[in-house]
Amino acid sequence: MWKNWSLLPLLVMALILVSSCSDFKKPELRGVENIQSPKLGTRQSVLSFELRCYNPNKSRFRLKHAKGEAWLEGQKFGDFRIDSSILVPGRSEFTIPVIIDLDMKNALKNSAVLLLKDEVEVKIEGKARLGKGGFYFNYPILFEGKQPVSQYIKK
């Protein structure tokens, strides 16, 4: 009988972990801020910015890192990465610093699209490492949709 009681705290912890992960809601993208080009070149260019997001979940979590690819109008825009570990508070806005290594083969096409259209089709695909209380899991990132160009570029 004593052996069964010693497993009780472990079972309670497992139930709490499973129930807290099962109802995870996807953070909402609210906007892009502080767009900068720290490195511009003919072979390689880097673009940095901050994503302003909202966490609809009651509980906080930690974003350890993320990486993936971004496309504009079906053309590869570049590879993105998030190197910072960020504590995301529950039910509040937060910012994520993002770095994109630009695909210079499509740079001219992408810049022309941004200047000529009012809306662009954006696709972002990748993986993020999220967690809470020392337990981390890979979370797929997938966003597809039209975005207004005026929000990012002043014409």
Image: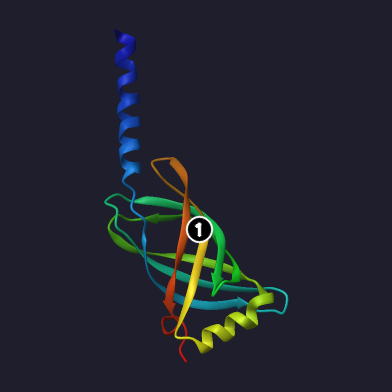
Residue furthest to the right in view is 43
Q: Quadrant of the N terminus?
A: top left
Q: Residue at x 47, y 85 (%)?
A: 153
Looking at the picture, the colour scheme in use is rainbow
Report the residue marked by disc 1: 84
Q: Residue at x 31, y 13 (%)?
A: 4
In the picture, measured across the screen, residue 137 lies left or right of residue 107, that is left
Q: In terms of image quadrants, where is residue 42?
A: bottom right
Q: Position of residue 62 (x, y in %)?
A: 41, 51
Q: Nearer the viewer, residue 123 or 93?
A: 123
The residue type indicated by label 1 comes to Ser
Under tag 1, what secondary structure? Answer: loop
Q: In terms of image quadrants, where is residue 40?
A: bottom right
Mark 1 crowdedness (10 Å alpha carbons): few <14, some 14-19, many ≥20: few
Q: Nearer the viewer, residue 110 or 95?
A: 110
Q: Position of residue 90 (x, y in %)?
A: 29, 54
Residue furthest to the top in view is 1
Q: Position of residue 119 (x, y in %)?
A: 44, 81
In the image, residue 56 sits, relative to residue 73, either above or below, namely: above
In the image, residue 37 sits, relative to residue 79, either above or below, namely: below
In the image, residue 58 sits, relative to residue 136, either above or below, namely: below
In the picture, measured across the screen, residue 46 lies left or right of residue 116, that is right
Q: Residue at x 47, y 92 (%)?
A: 155
